[in-house]
Image: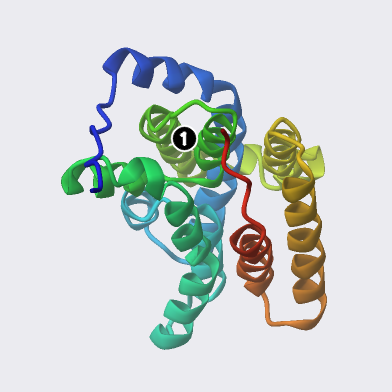
Amino acid sequence: MSIAPSGYRLEPAKVRSQFFRLLPISLFVVAFGIAFGLAAVQKGLAPLEATLMSVLVFAGASQFAAVDMWGPAVSVLPLMAVVFAINSRHILMGASLYPMLREMPPLQRYGILLVLTDANWAVSAQDYQNGRRNLEVILGGGFVLWLAWLIGTLLGVYFGGLLQEPRSLGLDMVLGCFLLSMALGGRKTPRVLVAWFVAGSASMAAYWWLPAHTHVVVGALAGGLVGFFWLEEAGP
């Protein structure tokens, strides 16, 4: 007989603590929000349109890709395909959180996923790997990142000339280094190390030889297959 899950209850105090936990990384999100706001107005979007895109979409890489394809005549289907390809990694990210998400009511479950990002997912996944359940970082951390992205967009729309090229300051490496530190901070069992190696190798191969943005999904699927077929032995 199966036992029904006891339920996952979000703790308001923990949500607030996770907001401040991701506050430092959010400062770098502001810088890229500035770059997006500037790029959007340079492509012809009105300040309100650029701001609403950041409020409602909240997907940095996809927004940059959409702006790159923006013009007097927008090809909707290619735009949708590119955005889907970039954001498809969220399918896998959400699936990895399912052991915790399934214990929540549907409204809460899908509500907190609206602010799911690479950064707060990495923290939650690492905590879960180390035996701690932490969906509060998805909500609290996601909210501070969304707020930083919105503030950055507004600054970029109206004062974007102050930071036209964040890559010149090395800011494009910050999130990558943050995610790498999350990966290195987790458990280092042979299973995990092999999964990371296979995922990295597959991702690099896809980056060189497959269409743009597919390397993210290919790497995640390759690493996931290792975990699927190489099961951990159950404890006593």
Q: Residue at x 37, y 56 (%)?
A: 57
Image coordinates of residue 132 in percent, x first then y, are 49, 26
- Pick the front one: 162 or 108: 108
- Pick the front one: 67 or 175: 175
Image coordinates of residue 100 in percent, x first then y, are 37, 40
The crowding category of the residue bearing disc 1, from other C-alpha atoms within 10 Å (few below 14, some 14 to 19, many at least 20), is many
- Element class at badge 1: helix
Image coordinates of residue 197 in percent, x first then y, are 81, 56
Color theme of the render: rainbow
Left or right position of 129 against 58 = right
Residue 179 higher or lower than 220, as above or below = above
Q: Residue at x 59, y 48 (%)?
A: 35
Residue 50 higher or lower than 128, as above or below = below
Q: How many marks?
A: 1
Image coordinates of residue 44 in percent, x first then y, are 45, 66
Task: Name which quarter of the figure residue 180 lies in.
Answer: top right
Q: Residue at x 44, y 29 (%)?
A: 133
Q: Looking at numbered disc 1 in the image, what kind of residue is underneath it?
A: Leu
- Pick the front one: 5 or 148: 5
- Pick the front one: 184 or 174: 184
Left or right position of 193 against 39 = right
Q: Quadrant of the C terminus?
A: top right
Which residue does the numbered mark 1 point to in the structure image? 145
